[in-house]
């Protein structure tokens, strides 16, 4: 689902509520910072763009941003509000699986198969998946912050924000 005016891609596997990483125990928050940054930068290195840098304040904002989109009762994962206006890029995934962070970023980067660097376009049937990938590897993006919350018994919602945003009209994510 894409929201107008927001560089957004959401892969919904199952839904939940949102808490910023910084509300998690410190060892978990540090592990998430390390793993999200590493997984993103591996994908970026593969296309020759500079690494992203983690910002803990941005991470807290990512959690609050996602919380503002929630419409369901506490403990549920219903999202229906349109994303508030923002100047950030965003990727989100909701899963009912106990998922490791590198797998979350791998879901987003699987969209690479739907992107043509030659034509700088996404396959029409896979726009959301492709745009999630493009945001991960968008060369002009410099800052990353991610939030997460548990969903139900075993699920999690992960949301990452990027600045500056990717997926800008007429822009290229990287030079092929």
Image (tube, grey):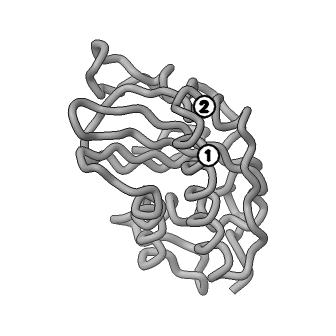
Residue 71 screen position, x and y as percent: 35, 17
Q: Does residue 3 show up?
A: yes
User: In screen coordinates, is 31 left or right of 141?
Assistant: left
Residue corresponding to mark 1: 30
Q: Could you say whether the residue bearing mark 2 is in a helix, strand or loop?
A: helix
Above or below: residue 151 compared with residue 165:
above
Q: Does residue 83 show up?
A: no
Above or below: residue 13 compared with residue 104:
above
User: In screen coordinates, is 46 left or right of 140?
Assistant: left
Residue corresponding to mark 2: 22
Q: Could you say whether the residue bearing mark 1 is in a helix, strand or loop?
A: helix
Q: Nearer the viewer, mark 1 or mark 2?
A: 1
Q: Residue at x 59, y 73 (%)?
A: 43
Q: Residues within 10 Å of mark 1 (few under 14, many from 20)?
A: some
| Placement of the C terminus among the 4 image quadrants | bottom right
Question: Which of the 4 image quadrants contains residue 65?
Answer: top right
Above or below: residue 32 compared with residue 38:
above
Closer to us: 92 or 54: 54
Q: Residue at x 56, y 42 (%)?
A: 27
Above or below: residue 135 compared with residue 147:
below
Q: Residues within 10 Å of mark 2 (few under 14, many from 20)?
A: many
Q: Earlier in the sequence, mark 1 or mark 2?
A: 2
Residue 114 screen position, x and y as percent: 43, 75
Q: Residue at x 34, y 54 (%)?
A: 99
Q: Total marks drawn? A: 2
Residue 156 screen position, x and y as percent: 35, 40
Q: Residue at x 67, y 32 (%)?
A: 86
User: In screen coordinates, is 135 left or right of 109?
Assistant: right
Question: Which of the 4 image quadrants contains residue 58?
Answer: top right
């Amino acid at each position: 689902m894409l929201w107008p005016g927001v560089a957004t891609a959401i892969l919904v596997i199952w839904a939940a509520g949102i808490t910023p990483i910084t509300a998690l125990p410190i060892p978990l928050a540090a592990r998430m910072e390390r793993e999200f940054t590493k997984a993103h930068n591996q994908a970026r290195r593969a296309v020759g763009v500079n690494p992203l840098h983690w910002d803990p304040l941005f991470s807290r904002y990512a959690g609050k941003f996602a919380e503002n989109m929630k419409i369901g009762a506490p403990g549920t994962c219903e999202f229906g509000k349109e994303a508030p206006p923002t100047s950030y890029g965003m990727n989100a995934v909701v899963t009912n699986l106990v998922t490791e962070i590198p797998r979350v970023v791998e879901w987003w980067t699987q969209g690479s198969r739907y992107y043509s660097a030659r034509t700088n376009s996404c396959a029409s049937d896979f726009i959301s998946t492709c745009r999630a990938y493009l945001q991960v590897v968008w060369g002009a993006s410099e800052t990353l912050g991610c939030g997460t919350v548990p969903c139900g018994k075993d699920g999690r919602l992960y949301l990452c924000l990027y600045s500056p945003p990717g997926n800008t009209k007429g822009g290229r994510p990287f030079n092929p």
